[in-house]
Amino acid sequence: MRHLLDIADLSVGEIGEMTETAEDIIKNPEKYMGICKGKKLATLFFEPSTRTRLSFEAAMIDLGGQVIGFESGTNSSASKGESVRDTARVVGNYADIIAMRHPSEGAAFAAAEVSPVPIINAGDGGHCHPTQTLADILTIKREAGRLDNLTIGLCGDLKYGRTVHSLIEAMIRYKNVSFVLISPEELALPDYMLDVLDENGAEYKITESLDRFMPNLDVLYMTRIQKERFDDLTEYERLKDSYVLTNEKLICAKKNMIILHPLPRVNEISPEVDSDPRAAYFRQTYNGKIMRMALIIKLLDCKNVKCGGVSKKYYLGYKCKNKKCITQTEYGLTEKNYIDKNGLRRCAYCDSLI
Ligand code: NCD
């Protein structure tokens, strides 16, 4: 059985096949209208969502399937203390596939250990968000016509922005892709992500300035400062308006630069930018639904097919110290870890150093 927990679970070839399916869905939607008839998707959202949950549900409905689920942990037995894994075991008896969003890092990974049906990680705390990356990739492909030879600026909350983590993990696998990491020092990319860049020999620059490398960028990926992940809200108040993209800032950008944002935006893109033809963030939300259709087709089709992405060797023992990791709250979860390419031991659920 295949799950999508991390974008590295999909090979570059598979992502290519999925973008082809997506483009065919856009051209010939009627071909796909009934192909999931009789199938059910469960959306288990323990955290707020507009686009991800509704686009998953719309995707399944457009494929002829049906949808069950909840949109807040407080409406589920999680509020009575039920574990993530028990929830997945139970819902696996009612649905053919599960999309799960949870505030703990690694939650979907824990659910996948016991779920009888495919689990899709729809966001696990500040860790990763692979289906947003699928939306981002289709958007870059459709807007730029390529996924290689790109300079990608990632701006805002690179520490807690899970969409950034998954996007980097995906794009390092394409040829000649370099990154400009734009953030205040306090919201810099976590070490495990810098290690991912280094291990793959990816070129990257780190800066606090949104203007400095603007003329070099092919893609500018803006992100929201993730208020809900801050332990100290005064720190959030201090950092929340670090970057605001305006028409003036875009004057020196390439004429065909693509402006992306996973949304919701708060203040980081001024509404005046919306009418700039380079602003692709609303088209990105449409692409998200289409790629989720391609993903559901793939995972429902792929029972008993071997994982096409990277598989890691796991070891037992060692307690993860990350306060936001699922291992801190999920009872009965076996502590698992892996050794990365630099010989460092990391939690198998949230990738933190142990
Ligand atoms: C993102 C998320 O939930 O991580 N939103 C989304 O899924 N489109 C980004 C965010 O909340 O800032």
Image (cartoon, rainbow, N blue to C red):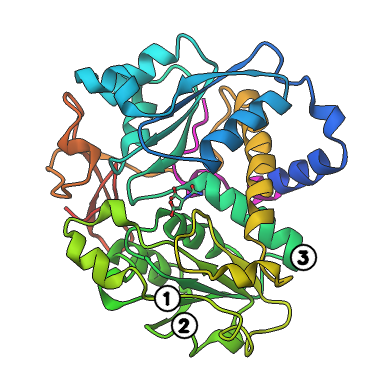
Looking at the rendered structure, which numbered label has been put on residue 145? 3
Q: What residue is drawn where x is 48% and y is 71%?
A: 154
Query: Label 2: few (<14), some or many (≥20) within 10 Å?
Result: many
Q: Mark 2 and mark 1: span between their CA atoms? A: 7 Å
What residue range appears in magenta?
Answer: 1-16
Tag 2, which secondary structure? Answer: loop
Circle 1: residue type: Tyr
> First in sequence: mark 2 or mark 3?
3
Residue 108 relative to residue 68: left or right: left
Q: What residue is drawn where x is 60% and y is 56%?
A: 136
Comparing 126 with 263, the one in front is 263
Comparing 129 with 9, the one in front is 129
The mark total stands at 3
x%, y% of residue 221? Answer: 53, 67
Residue 343 relative to residue 65: left or right: left
Circle 2: residue type: Leu
Q: Check disc 2 and report the residue beneath it.
A: 210
Looking at the rendered structure, which numbered label has been put on residue 243? 1
Query: Label 3: few (<14), some or many (≥20) within 10 Å?
Result: few
x%, y% of residue 297? Answer: 67, 29
> First in sequence: mark 3 or mark 1?
3
